[in-house]
Image (tube, rainbow, N blue to C red):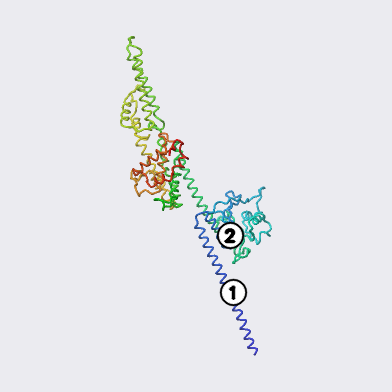
Amino acid sequence: MTDNENSSIGSGSYSDQINSLLSRLVTDVRQFTESQLSQIKRLAQIGTALSAEKNLDRLLEMIVDEARQFTNADAGTLYIISDDETELNFAIVQNNSLGVRMGGTGGKITWPPVNLKNADGSPNHANVSAHVAISGDVVNITDVYDAQGFNFEGTKKFDQGTGYRSKSMLVVPLRNHENDIIGVLQLLNAQDLAKENVIKFSYESQEMTLSLASQAAIALSNNRLIQDLQNLLESFIRTIAMAIDEKSPYTGGHVRRVAELSMTIANKINETQEGKFAELKLTDDQLRELRLAAWLHDVGKITTPEHIVDKATKLETVYDRVNEVRTRFELLKKEYNLEIHNKRPDNQNIKKNEYSGEISEAINQLNEEYMFIAELNNGSEFTNDNMVARIKEIGKRQLTVDGQIMPLLSEDEIYNLSINRGTLNNEERNIINNHAMVTYKMLSQLPFPKKMRNVSMYAAAHHEKLDGTGYPMGLKGDELSLQSRIIAMADIFEALTAKDRPYKKGKTLGEALKIMGFMVKDKYIDSDLFDLFIKEKIYSDYAVRELAPQQIDV
């Protein structure tokens, strides 16, 4: 073989080796690139899923689940920094080998929090999770039993009690969009692909976990921000409702009672397994919308004058005018006394007892008439036509005040005393009734989120009736939503049984339910809701909580 041939053969063999190496390199690079792309894609999918999750408990679980899957970790713990930034609270604890899943949808963890400060006030750097929360550093440990600088006595004690062997650990901070640390993610025991051996968390796993932690922190912050805004809105609404109730010492607590009773009815609808409501389930958003509407149903009363809201008697305006009427009666008695005395002749033969008897009869009649007026003024009984005629007759009496002749009762006093039922005249009742339309006008101007767009209508329709005779819009039948019917029934039951109204005595349970039964027959309130109210005894717990013992007769 010639030297040229040897050279040719050597050259070919070397070229094949180079090509083979290049081929393997291209394959490795492609696989590495595909792996990276796959991880990046997976990370993006996780970020999207985290952002879409609105339930805080499920979000917390998802953060740990995804982090463990991403790094092939056997266990994971998520801590959330307390509001005062002094503690790390356990939010999620998972351990696949031990079958442990705590926190999130599994309920609150009762383990004591990790203090971020020692007893002397110095930072707690001995605990690895506290150290990460304080410093913001990432800690990647090959074996916690050999680690220096941290106290793992608690981990070792846990292992002794469970037979577990904690080894590799990765601890990363959760930073939000403002770079504040809001929590700590701790992963334990990374496993090889076969899940046979515990290995160290790789640099790639560490970087990917940091990226995941960043996305998780932002998603968690957004979730908490939304929840905080919802809590702020509901708290603000309850404050407004409390202010409206406080306008009157007689209606304090009315809005709260109606709201709580409305939600009890709604929750019972969701629980029922038979009847018309068996297939109906109100979503969390629908329940929240109903709750806001119930708390706001009387917001229109903010424009109603207090003296009308508080009108405890028929003659009350800013004060009860019955006291003026009583003064006039007393003046009239004195006039009668003087008049009869002046009529008596000087003849001493007139017996004194005849004079006294005449005065007594006149005074007794005036006393009886005043008692009649005072009783009517309470508004507790129905005023019939005969009573109205007697009021007008009494009002014709005259007396002299400062030389001026005036009627015993003014036209306005006669008008108010002639009110058939309750203490409000027609004009005052219209003012009161107008609060429902004012409620709608006020709430319809507010930019409620899309999921709350029906709050104004639900709230304003609480005085509507199924037969269309209600107010303010005269809605009837299917025009009335289930939510409006719920609030309406709660409002009626509360009004019938309220024990703090000055113009009427609170009905007993039996009386209230009987009246509501008649309202069902008259097509005022929903029969299916009332049947549920009775069947499930929704009134029972409410009665124990809100009514006087003597009212509970069912």
Residue type at mark 2 is: Asn
The image quadrant that residue 71 belongs to is bottom right
- Residue 428 % position (x, y): 37, 37
Q: 370 above or below 123? A: above
Residue type at mark 1 is: Leu
Front residue of 158 and 245: 158
Q: From the viewer's perspective, is 225 left or right of 415?
A: right
Q: Given this view, does label 2 or label 1 mark the residue nearer the observer? A: 2
Q: How crowded is mark 2: few (under 14 residues within 10 Å), some or many (20 or more)?
A: few
Front residue of 404 and 27: 27
- Residue 56 % position (x, y): 52, 54
Q: Is mark 2 on a helix, strand or loop?
A: loop
Q: 432 above or below 446? A: above
- Give the residue at mark 2: 96
- Give the residue at mark 1: 25
Front residue of 199 and 539: 539
Of callouts 2 and 1, the N-terminal one: 1
Q: Do the residues labelled 2 and 1 touch (CB within 8 Å)?
A: no
- Residue 449 % position (x, y): 44, 52
Q: Residues within 10 Å of mark 1 (few under 14, many from 20)?
A: few
Q: 389 above or below 6? A: above
Give the distance between the C-alpha atoms of the residues marked 2 and 1, in whole angstroms. Answer: 37 Å
The image quadrant that residue 126 belongs to is bottom right
Q: Is mark 1 on a helix, strand or loop?
A: helix
- Residue 481 % position (x, y): 38, 49
Q: 236 above or below 390? A: below
